[in-house]
Amino acid sequence: MTEIGTQIKQRRRLLKVTQRQLADLSGVGINTLTKIERNEANPTLDILQKILDTLGLELSVSVKKISE
């Protein structure tokens, strides 16, 4: 499984958006965004949602299957 920060960085680069632009567009601090992209931060769901919305990504959660 790819880390969320890595996925954010890949999408941002694909869209040719700088970190500064993404920070401004999403309303998230540049230092916070940098740490998230380096997988050095544990962002709140609110901050994560702002970034994902700006990049056109969505977060999904599913229940694990229990193996017996």
Image: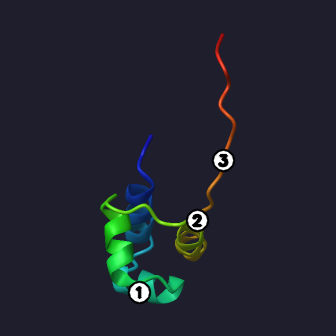
* Eye-nearest disc, 2 or 3: 2
Which residue corresponds to mark 2?
Answer: 45
The quadrant of the rendering that contains the N terminus is top left
Query: From this viewpoint, which residue is outermost toward the top?
Result: 68
Type of residue at label 1?
Answer: Gln
Q: Are marks 3 and 1 in contact (CB under 8 Å)?
A: no
Type of residue at label 2?
Answer: Leu
* Eye-nearest disc, 3 or 1: 3
Q: Position of residue 68 (x, y in %)?
A: 66, 10
Q: Residues within 10 Å of mark 3 (few under 14, many from 20)?
A: few
Query: Could you say which disc has been placed on residue 61 in the image?
Result: 3
CA distance separating discs 1 and 2: 20 Å
Of 2 and 46, the residue lying toward us: 46
Q: Are marks 1 and 2 in contact (CB under 8 Å)?
A: no
Which residue corresponds to mark 1?
Answer: 21
Q: Position of residue 22 (x, y in %)?
A: 44, 81
* Eye-nearest disc, 1 or 2: 2
Quadrant for residue 40, please give it.
bottom left
Identify the residue at image location x=69%, y=36%: 63
Q: Position of residue 52 (x, y in %)?
A: 56, 68
Identify the residue at image location x=40%, y=84%: 29
The first of marks 2 and 3 along the sequence is 2
Q: Residues within 10 Å of mark 1 (few under 14, many from 20)?
A: few
Q: Which structural element holds mark 2?
A: helix
The first of marks 3 and 1 along the sequence is 1
Q: Position of residue 27 (x, y in %)?
A: 51, 86
Of 67 and 23, the residue lying toward us: 67
Q: How is the image coloured?
A: rainbow
Q: Which structural element holds mark 1?
A: helix
Type of residue at label 3?
Answer: Val
